[in-house]
Image: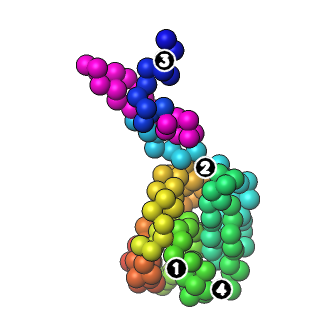
Amino acid sequence: MSFSTMLPDKLRQWLSCGGDVAVICMFENIWIWFANAASGMAVHDDCKLKFLELKAKRTYRYIVFKIEEKQKQVIVEKVGEPSQSYEDFAASLPADECRYAVYDFDFVTEENCQKSRIFFIAWSPDTSRVRSKMIYASSKDRFKRELDGIQVELQATDPTEMGLDVFRSRAN
């Protein structure tokens, strides 16, 4: 008898659909398994290159990233030129779909010093599909690790959670 034939039907179904399992064990005739938390999304090289350009050369004001589910990878969807405003950035996020974004926020300190902070935004609107929310949530940490230099992270489900006032308060 092979190991896979001993597995419960639900687990066999999960594995046959490409599900990833971190641990499988049997304890007192009860099967226990834990789905792996990482979604396995690849990160397209262009994502890293554009982020480095934003960080080092300030070539962009913002970058919007999208997960291509069929290709199982994060790609660059849109970039904003340095002259574009926060309003342009906010308008580039879809109202009913999840996205990741990076925004280069310029501000002046109380000591009148010009500074900048790179924000990572996990945009997950309430109206987006549950599956999409799960994929974006499970891929976020791995994707963020690819973008070395993020200084502040925001999780937003509606525009008020990522308004300019939120950026200002989190920048200091």
Residue at figure coordinates x 63%, y 56% from the top left: 69
| Residue 84 marker | 4
Secondary structure of the residue carrying numbered label 1: loop
**Of marks 2 and 4, which one's residue comes earlier in the chain?**
2
Secondary structure of the residue carrying numbered label 4: loop
Q: CA distance from mark 3 to mark 1?
A: 46 Å
Secondary structure of the residue carrying numbered label 2: loop
Instruction: Name the residue that disc number 1 marks.
Output: 95
Q: Nearer the viewer, mark 3 or mark 1?
A: 3
- Label 3 with label 2: CB-CB less than 8 Å: no
Instruction: Name the residue that disc number 2 marks.
Output: 41
Q: Please provide percent x and percent y for residue 52.
A: 69, 61
Q: Which residues are magenta?
A: 13-33
Q: Please provide percent x and percent y for residue 71.
A: 69, 53
Q: CA distance from mark 3 to mark 2?
A: 28 Å
Tell me which corner region of the image, top left, top right, bottom left or bottom right, holds residue 10: top left
Residue at figure coordinates x 51%, y 55% from the top left: 135
Q: Please provide percent x and percent y for residue 111.
A: 44, 82
- Label 1 with label 2: CB-CB less than 8 Å: no
**Of marks 3 and 2, which one's residue comes earlier in the chain?**
3
Q: Amino acid at mark 4?
A: Gln
